[in-house]
């Protein structure tokens, strides 16, 4: 799969790999593991999705991380 | 290198700091810098991870792994490379894919079970459906999940997957039309995927389409 094909598939199926045909999803994930261009494309598309900030989730996550880093 | 995070009373000044500076402060042990970085980037990482691993809770684990990587790796990022945001999202993508594949490799994982369902979803029972449940653990797990479904969906899936019946045979056994049986199988698989993925209760009994007793 090329990055161009990957982009076309994102346009076709969206960003959620749960709804992609399984084989194509795995091919796309393999591409992203080896291609920074594919990673950046995917991140860029995810960034265009609307997403409200979640301060509660972020605070909880910060506490878990801080706790992990305090543990011996 | 500082080995623990500490809280400094400088959070108000950090909101204007560039990511590079916050990263240095975080690596130096500043908890406030971590929180600002999370506010800026965790949402995006969460969305990406959720799209890749397919589960909100697993996505949170991925985001946590990303920030622990920021902390633990000495050579994680330097200002001369890509932008910090570009770099952290690349790490997020890689972590999410690894996480997804680890989850799928577990024999008891919902993904393995739904793949088993998908393998039979064309309803072309050839008498080998049971054989495709490759190991006892997988079969037991699927049986337990099917048992929780509404009666008609449960019966249709049990006959198809565990008794190797064809659709035509199931129609005869359940005294139902072919259209109904196919609908029971389809809805049952959908309900199982949803159940396995999100752990939700199944909707009320599906009684549509069964022929009236005569």
Image (spheres, grey):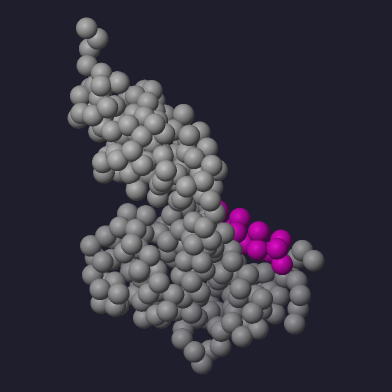
From the top left corner, tell me how far across and down residue B26 is, in percent: 65, 76
Instruction: Give me the residue at 56% from left, 84% from top.
Output: B77
* Farthest right residue in view: A72
- Quadrant location, the C terminus of chain B: top left
Instruction: Give me the residue at 54% from left, 47% from top.
Output: B108
Residue B67 seen in render: yes
Q: Which of B203 and B60 is in front in this view?
A: B203
Q: Residue A2's quadrant in the figure?
A: bottom left
Task: Judge from the rendering whether residue A70 lies leftward or rightward of residue B201; answer left or right.
Answer: right
Residue B11 seen in render: no
What is the magenta range?
A: A56-69
Instruction: Give me the residue at 31% from left, 34% from top.
Output: B185
Task: Judge from the rendering whether residue B41 lies leftward or rightward of residue A69; answer left or right.
Answer: left
- Residue A66 lies, with reference to residue B131, above or below; the image says below
From the top left corner, tell me how far across and down residue B165 is, in percent: 32, 31
From the top left corner, tell me how far across and down residue B132 is, in percent: 41, 46
From the top left corner, tell me how far across and down residue B167 is, in percent: 26, 32
Instruction: Give me the residue at 49% from left, 56% from top.
Output: B104
- Residue B37 lies, with reference to residue B139, above or below; the image says below
Total marks placed: 0
């Amino acid at each position: 799969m090329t990055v161009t094909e990957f982009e076309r598939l994102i346009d076709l199926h969206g960003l959620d790999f749960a709804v992609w045909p399984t084989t194509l999803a795995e091919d796309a994930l393999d591409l992203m593991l080896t291609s920074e261009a594919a990673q950046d494309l995917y991140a860029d598309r995810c960034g265009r999705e609307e997403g409200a900030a979640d301060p509660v989730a972020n605070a909880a996550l910060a506490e878990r991380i801080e706790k992990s880093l305090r543990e011996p | 290198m500082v080995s623990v995070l500490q809280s400094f009373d400088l959070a108000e000044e950090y909101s204007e700091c560039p990511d590079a500076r916050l990263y240095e402060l975080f690596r130096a042990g500043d908890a406030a810098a971590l929180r600002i970085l999370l506010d800026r980037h965790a949402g995006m990482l969460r969305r990406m991870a959720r799209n890749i691993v397919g589960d909100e809770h697993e996505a949170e684990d991925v985001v946590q792994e990303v920030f622990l990587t920021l902390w633990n790796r000495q050579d994680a990022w330097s200002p001369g490379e890509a932008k910090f945001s570009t770099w952290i999202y690349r790490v997020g993508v890689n972590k999410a894919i690894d996480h997804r594949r680890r989850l799928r490799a577990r024999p008891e994982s919902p993904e393995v079970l739904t793949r088993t369902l998908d393998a039979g979803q064309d309803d072309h029972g050839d008498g080998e459906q049971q054989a495709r449940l490759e190991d006892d653990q997988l079969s037991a797990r699927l049986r337990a999940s099917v048992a929780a479904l509404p009666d008609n969906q449960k019966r249709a899936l049990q006959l198809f997957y565990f008794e190797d019946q064809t659709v035509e045979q199931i129609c005869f056994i359940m005294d139902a039309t072919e259209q109904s049986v196919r609908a029971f199988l389809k809805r049952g698989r959908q309900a199982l995927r949803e159940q396995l993925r999100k752990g939700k209760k199944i909707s009320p009994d599906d009684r549509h389409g069964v022929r009236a007793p005569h």
